[in-house]
Image: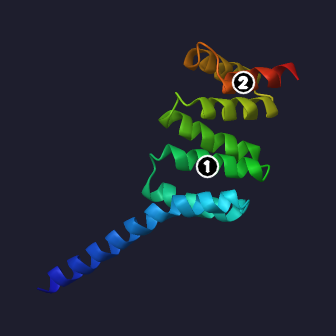
Amino acid sequence: MFMRKYFFIFLLFLISNLANASNYYEDALSKYDLKDFKSSIQLLEKNIVFNPKDSDSWILLGKSYASIENKEVAFKYLEIAFTLKPESPELNLLLGKLSHDLNLNEKYQTYLENLEIICPSGCNELSQLKKIKID
């Protein structure tokens, strides 16, 4: 009986934490939209503990860091997202832009080539990334 009580309490604790985790991303997105990037980052870092395979959280985390001009950390988080969602045009564009900004020319070329494969007829992301190299 004693063990059942503690097991039940533990189970409730676990369920409540998982319920809170589902709100972290939505709250972080709201903070990001309000340009409260530091709060967004805090919420997303909590969310990825519970949802490490949530590519949207990794992408938003990278975008949040990029918004506060921490491009190296942004690049790191976006690369993690890339391992989960390499076919994303948005993600290849974001990584391509950061690669260009960080003078990682080989990486820039890789993301440009990825977009050429993903968008064989062309797409907005491919056009934007090509324009960066020209400018």
Q: Secondary structure at mark 2?
A: helix
Q: In x, y percent, where is residue 5?
A: 19, 84
Q: Local crowd at mark 1 within 10 Å, few (<14), some, or many (≥20)?
A: many
In the image shown, does 78 or 132 lie closer to the viewer?
132
Q: CA distance from mark 2 to mark 1?
A: 20 Å
Please, what is the three-letter code of the amino acid marked with disc 2?
A: Tyr
Residue at 26% across, 73% down: 11
Q: In x, y percent, where is residue 66?
A: 74, 47
Position above or below: 9 against 35: below
Query: Which label sits on residue 101?
Result: none
- For marks 2 and 1, give the one nearer the viewer: 1
In the image shown, does 30 or 15 lie closer to the viewer?
30
Q: Local crowd at mark 2 within 10 Å, few (<14), some, or many (≥20)?
A: many
Residue at 38% across, 65% down: 18
Please, what is the three-letter code of the amino acid marked with disc 1?
A: Leu
Which quadrant of the figure contains the N terminus?
bottom left
* Among the two numbered marks 2 and 1 on one chain, the one whose residue lies closer to the N terminus: 1
Which quadrant of the figure contains the C terminus?
top right
Residue at 53% across, 60% down: 26
Residue at 69% across, 52% down: 64
Q: Badge 2 is on which residue?
A: 108
